[in-house]
Amino acid sequence: MVGGTERIFVELDAEWALVCAETGHALLVRGWLEAAGVLAPGEGPERLEELLAELGRRDRAAGPAHSDRWLGAVLAVAAGEGRAAQLAARVVVQAMLPGAFRLTRRLMRAERDFDEVGQVVVAALYQVARAYPASRRQKVAANVLLETLHRASRELQADFEPDGVAWQPALASLPAQQDVVAAAWRGVLAERAGSVVLAEVPAAEELSGPRGELIELLLWGVASGMVDTERARAIADEVREGGREAAERAGVSAVAWRKRRSRTVRQLRAVAASWAQAA
């Protein structure tokens, strides 16, 4: 699923291969899905890894309604006890592993180790899988990721989100094509940006796309000590206003302003390199 040096996720993929090789696991999972009406008797692949891949393909074709049905069925088993519950939770963890990987990257900070953050995220995901409330029957995948983000951020207790990312169940009702984790994160960025690099708290929607990426980069730079607060605010203003308007407001010539922008670009490149290395 992943590459590079993300050891925790590589190890989980390797462990999943062993889970799939265990005699009887595929039959158990197929039985849960057949009982829930997700699969007809004898329908679908017989190998567990192929079955999970097929469910993923159907999710992409049919949308949340399909994933709600099969995830809900497996989560109901995960809430129980014994071998079946442990297997069900592991199936959910594997299905949600791409989302867990994205959460880990979102929760990275200059002082954090990727694998340590990944372990916190995966542990939170497993806890959510084992305790998921049966009453939440819609947008199940979105709810699982939001609850995982909430738990993992509280466990990490960083300066960036000292109280953790708040549980926001309304986000789970966003359209299927929207990334609920990204939406939750924009709310966090908005609050933090208003206290560090912007004059006031912006609307979360303002921090999508390139502007959001710049603000997150500046927040990283301030947190890591590579950019002081006043400089971060100046950079945010420069980018928002554009060259001519910012130069006129600052009372400097266009040539001097271009030199200032060149220094800004060099500084941001250094911050971006540090950010990428940490992530």
Image (spheres, grey):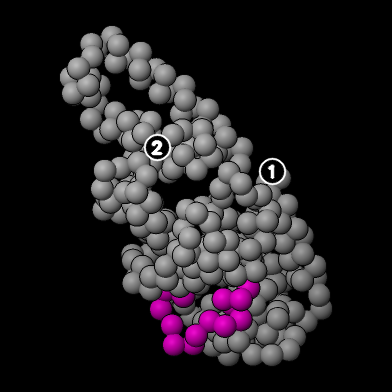
Front in this rendered view, residue 17 or 76: 76
Q: What is the x, y in percent for residue 107?
A: 54, 54
Q: Residues within 10 Å of mark 1 (few under 14, many from 20)?
A: few
9 w.r.t. 125: above or below: above
Q: Residue at x 62, y 49 (%)?
A: 112
Which quadrant holds residue 152?
Answer: bottom right
Relative to 5, 108 lies left or right: left
Q: What is the x, y in percent for residue 104?
A: 57, 55
Q: Quadrant of the C terminus?
A: top right
Q: Residue at x 59, y 70 (%)?
A: 125
Residue 33 shows in the view: no
- What secondary structure is found at the residue carrying circle 1? loop
Q: Earlier in the sequence, mark 2 or mark 1?
A: 1
Q: Amino acid at mark 1?
A: Gly
Which dot, 2 or 1, sits closer to the camera?
2
Q: Residue at x 61, y 42 (%)?
A: 278
Count the labels in the image: 2
Residue 144 shows in the view: yes
Q: What residue does disc 1 label?
A: 4
- What secondary structure is found at the residue carrying circle 2? helix
Magenta stretch contains residue 139:
yes
Determine the CA span between mark 2 and mark 1: 33 Å
Relative to 66, 205 lies left or right: left
Q: What is the x, y in percent for residue 163?
A: 46, 65
What segment is highlighted magenta in the picture? 126-142
Q: Residues within 10 Å of mark 2 (few under 14, many from 20)?
A: some
Q: Amino acid at mark 2?
A: Thr
Residue 229: which numbered mark, if any? 2
Front in this rendered view, residue 235 or 97: 235
Q: What is the x, y in percent for residue 31?
A: 65, 86
Magenta stretch contains residue 107:
no
Q: Residue at x 72, y 61 (%)?
A: 12
